[in-house]
Image (cartoon, rainbow, N blue to C red):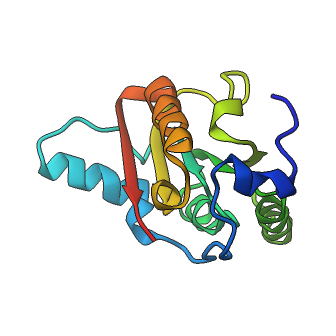
């Protein structure tokens, strides 16, 4: 994976940088909840009680991944964001809490390659689709298509 674009070029690439990303925990992205919803709909889904993989695309500060790691230590979590400051804050919180199962990746969706991200059981994207250009939305869809396992679950929401 190459170094990602400088923060000064992010806006021209299609990311909305006029507002600071939210720093909360999004409980609806809990893998247990996602799998329960799929089961209620009669759909196959991963089992979050055994080792699983999870990526939060456009993770912001990574707070959702951080809190999920504390609740579900059997997960291998990835927090992905293109803004250096977001990844820096996430790593600082990670270090302060002694978290062991999160990998922070500063990258655009078109820069994510198989050697840094494994096949995923769960993938999420909060607010991303409403903050980026149609080109970047297409790159996110391509990532999900490439990395999500056949019975994996993807959930997206809007700011």
Most distant residue in the front direction = 12
Image position of 140 with respect to 142: above or below = below
In depth, the one of 151 and 159 nearer the eye is: 159
Q: Is residue 35 shown left or right of residue 59?
A: left
Image position of 116 with respect to 70: above or below = above
Residue 153 lies in quadrant: top left
Q: Is residue 109 shown left or right of residue 145?
A: right
In depth, the one of 135 and 83 nearer the eye is: 135
The residue at 53%/32% (across/down) is 143
The answer to whether residue 14 is seen in the rendering is yes
Q: Whole-percent x and y of residue 39?
A: 18, 47
Image position of 68 with respect to 117: above or below = below
Q: Whole-percent x and y of residue 28?
A: 38, 66
Residue 122 lies in quadrant: top left
The residue at 68%/76% (across/down) is 20
The residue at 75%/53% (across/down) is 10
Q: Tally the numbered discs.
A: 0
Image position of 151 with respect to 57: above or below = above
Quadrant in which the N terminus appears: top right
The residue at 53%/27% (across/down) is 119
The answer to whether residue 82 is seen in the rendering is no
Q: Is residue 38 shown left or right of residue 77?
A: left
In depth, the one of 147 and 159 nearer the eye is: 159
Q: Whole-percent x and y of residue 135?
A: 54, 39
Q: Is residue 151 shown left or right of residue 39?
A: right
């Amino acid at each position: 994976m190459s170094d990602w674009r400088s923060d000064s070029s992010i806006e021209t690439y299609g990311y909305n940088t006029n507002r600071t990303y939210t720093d909360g925990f999004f409980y609806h992205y809990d893998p247990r909840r996602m799998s329960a919803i799929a089961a209620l709909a009669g759909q196959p889904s991963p089992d979050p009680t055994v080792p699983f993989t999870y990526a939060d695309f456009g993770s912001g500060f990574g707070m959702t991944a951080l809190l999920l790691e504390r609740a579900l230590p059997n997960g291998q979590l990835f927090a992905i964001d293109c803004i250096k400051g977001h990844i820096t804050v996430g790593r600082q919180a990670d270090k302060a809490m002694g978290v062991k199962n999160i990998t922070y990746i500063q990258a655009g969706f078109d820069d994510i390659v198989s050697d840094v991200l494994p096949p995923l059981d769960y993938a999420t994207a909060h607010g991303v689709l409403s903050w980026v250009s149609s080109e970047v939305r297409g790159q996110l869809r391509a990532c999900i298509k490439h990395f999500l396992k056949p019975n994996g679950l993807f959930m997206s929401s809007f700011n």
